[in-house]
Amino acid sequence: MEKGIKIVTIGGGSSYTPELVDGFLKRYDSLPVRELWLVDVPEGEHKMQVVAGLARRMVKRAGVPMEIHTTLDRRTALKDAEFVTTQLRVGQLQARIKDERIPISHGILGQETNGAGGLFKGLRTIPVIMDICRDMQELCPKAWLINFTNPVGMVMEGIHKYTDFHKIIGLCNVPIGMHRAIAELLGRRMDEVQVTFGGLNHMVFATKVIVDDKDVTKEVLKLWGGQSVKNIKGVVWNPDFIEELGVLPCSYHRYYYMTKEYLQEEQEKFEKHEVRAEFVKGVEEELFKLYENPSLDQKPKLLEERGGAYYSDAACNLINSIYNDKRDIQVVNTVNHGAIENFEDDEVVEVSCVITKNGPVPQKVGRLPKAVNGLIQQIKSFEAAGSAAAVTGDRKKALLALMINPLVMSQKTAEVVLEELLEAHRKYLPRFFADKTSIDKEEQL
């Protein structure tokens, strides 16, 4: 019997894990995963064991020889792995609640990839991903790291600039959701519609749509209302704005183009203790009650409410294409290499790529319109400043990142929010405090 593939998922106790398992099972003939290792920290051990139980029942139902392993020892899991996926949350959901509620309490948006909340998730996450990369270089140097951990763009920027680890690809489910939405608008199957993407993570644009060898971008621009994702209310785009913009924005662009409306909505949720993180916490509690049911042997429909729709398609398609050298086109976060002229060659972008056994090859997108250039440059500088702050623990760099971000809007607010979030996350931000030598890697995972 052939050996099969060993894959490690760090953050294995995540409610997303059944999505991943489902994706591997569906592709078993072309992607024979024989060992799936779930890794988590002590605080996440119970959830990991619950998820592992469901995963084993899913495997049994599928009738394939996939072994599910669990461990709190990351290094044991990583030994000789061929692919590693990261879907971790430093500080668990309670940290996300702080990321959202503290900024809103000062009149600015909080969100896990945008503004002050996004910065602080990056500050907590980048050092941990760097540690994982170092372990991989030692224990599984040929393995690819597929990072689904937000903020993907800032994490990727940090790894690229401050390590010599290059076998990392950032992944998001937003482009695949946009592709599906565009196909639905045109009444076609996804495989009949070719969409080119370019931009940054959670700030990506569809730049061209081809159907039957015909450019139908202008037609789609007139139709585009933008598809809501689970964590963003469906505010409708003004069709004149979209047509004049010349490219199709993603759902997360609404934070920047409709800031006032979103802030008002989030402030109302804040008063009711219904910010997105608090909603997600409720969904997760329901999900894990379902996961604990010994008769459940497939991913439940409720999982879509978690915001992870198409995650398994995106992650498993990417791994499958690398493993089989499929050379199909997928949208990932990687080094620009001249694909998008608005960015430097060595900056990380989210872009359509040919996926090969040697990794992604970015496709030429050209120059994004001047109408969007200012915003994408501002966010790229935010990612760069944020990743520098994460690596150094320098408060001045963290303040710079906050001040750059267009959702912050106030120096006084930036100063206050910076100090409150630093104190709130002190346990997970040792670089920012006096004793910078006692970083407990496993505690921060």
Image (cartoon, grey):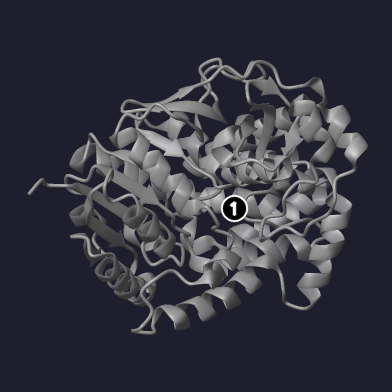
Q: Is residue 369 above or below residue 129?
A: above
Outermost residue toward the left in this view: 1
Residue 415 appears at what percent x and percent y? 74, 51
- Residue shown at 53% from the left, 43% from the top: 152
Q: Is residue 16 visible?
A: yes
Q: Which image quarter holds the C terminus?
A: bottom left
User: Nearest the camera: 260 or 330?
Assistant: 330
- Residue shown at 37% from the left, 49% from the top: 85
Q: Which image quadrant is residue 142 in? A: top left
According to the picture, the residue beneath numbered tag 1 turns out to be: 120
- Residue shown at 34% from the left, 73% from the top: 54
- Residue type indicated by callout 1: Phe
Helix, strand or loop at label 1? It is: helix
Residue 199 appears at what percent x and percent y? 64, 30
Q: Is residue 191 above or below residue 335?
A: below
Binning the other alpha carbons within 10 Å of mark 1 as few (below 14), some (14 to 19) or many (20 upward) gives many
User: Nearest the camera: 329 or 45?
Assistant: 329
User: Nearest the camera: 357 or 278?
Assistant: 357
User: Nearest the camera: 359 or 160?
Assistant: 359
- Residue shown at 40% from the left, 62% from the top: 17
